[in-house]
Amino acid sequence: MTVRSALVAAGGFAASAATAWVFHWLGLPLAWIFGSMLGAAIYANSVPGMGRTHLIRRSGQLLIGSSVASVLDVETIYDVAALLPVMIGAAVAANLIAVAISLPLARLAGVDRLSALLAALPAGMAEMSSLAADLNARADFVMVAHSLRVVLVVVTVPLLIGPDIDAAIAVAPPVGGSHAALATCFVLGVALAFVANRFNLLNPWIIMPMSVGVALVLSGYALAPMPRPLLILAQIAIGFSLGMRLRREDLTRLPRATIAGLGASLTLVGAMMVFAAFALPILAELSFPTLALAVAPGGLGEMIATAKALGLASATVASFQFVRSFMTNLMAPLIIVRLMGRHGSRK
């Protein structure tokens, strides 16, 4: 990254944070995420020469992962682990719905079935876009579709659960705890995330701090809660990275695909909300707001940040999101071989 592009990126983050502060001053919900997303989108489409901003996103993810670890205790860890069968069921349901909507998505967007399938599967944008490039599918369409879906989830799901938020089981901030343990969690999480990233492991910037936190808690060390200014900074970083994806040239270059991708995303989100409202409460004694964020097909960092902002069970949301992302990446090659073998490699 050149000095100029670094300065442009820093200016974008400053503009994003300023817009977030205005949203907060106005008393708008999820101000730090929505405001920073809007500010980043306006800046990215107005100022040329924006370089890579992955370091800002990774910093936000590391803080989010550490903040999840800071609300853990032994009982919470065991409670979340007991929900693993439900998490797997929710992941399978999301993937089945994605497979079902991939064929109409391909026809409406005017792309091949493989590209539509990779765009519909509920995993991370980076993983699915890389897989699309490896398989000679439409990586540009996959990237736009996933970006739109994450933004759609972040905007619509909190609005949907808003009327029920008072019924949510809010996470009580931990009492006491060690700031040294929290700092250790963050530092070790950063180190392990860099190592894990070298091996292309899934979501290391969030998962590694969480894993270190689990190990510390199970070893008898209580973590102090994440300071609020750092939580705000993490939410701004997540919103900033979302807004940076909303490039006008990407959306206007693929107008038909953009509209079809939004329709497919709405279908998947709506189906998972129905699943969270009617099926999952039978299997898990969790509030609808927590379940809605847990199964929403958004990004891991975005959903955890939203859960933290709303005071919901972020550890539960993080676990559901990770299991779905992990299983989707695990099942994607099998799904592709099965469907593409039946319908032709790229038809």
Image (cartoon, rainbow, N blue to C red):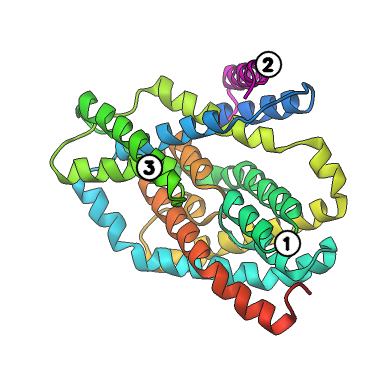
The answer to whether residue 21 is magenta is yes
- Say which residue label 2 marks: 4
Q: Nearer the viewer, residue 188 or 33?
A: 188
Do we see residue 139 in this rendering? yes
Do we see residue 168 in this rendering? no
Residue kind at label 3, given as amino acid type:
Val
State the extent of the magenta-drawn residues as a range.
1-30
Position of residue 239 measured from the top left corner of the image (x, y, whole percent) = 59, 32
User: In the picture provided, is 237 more to the left or to the right than 268?
Assistant: left
User: In the picture provided, is 112 more to the left or to the right than 143?
Assistant: right
- Give the mark, 2 or 3, whose residue is nearer the N terminus: 2
Position of residue 67 measured from the top left corner of the image (x, y, whole percent) = 36, 34
- Give the mark, 1 or 2, whose residue is nearer the N terminus: 2
Q: Nearer the viewer, residue 33 or 221?
A: 221
Residue kind at label 2, given as amino acid type:
Arg
Q: Residues within 10 Å of mark 2 (few under 14, many from 20)?
A: few
User: In the picture provided, is 163 more to the left or to the right than 112?
Assistant: left
- Say which residue label 1 marks: 137
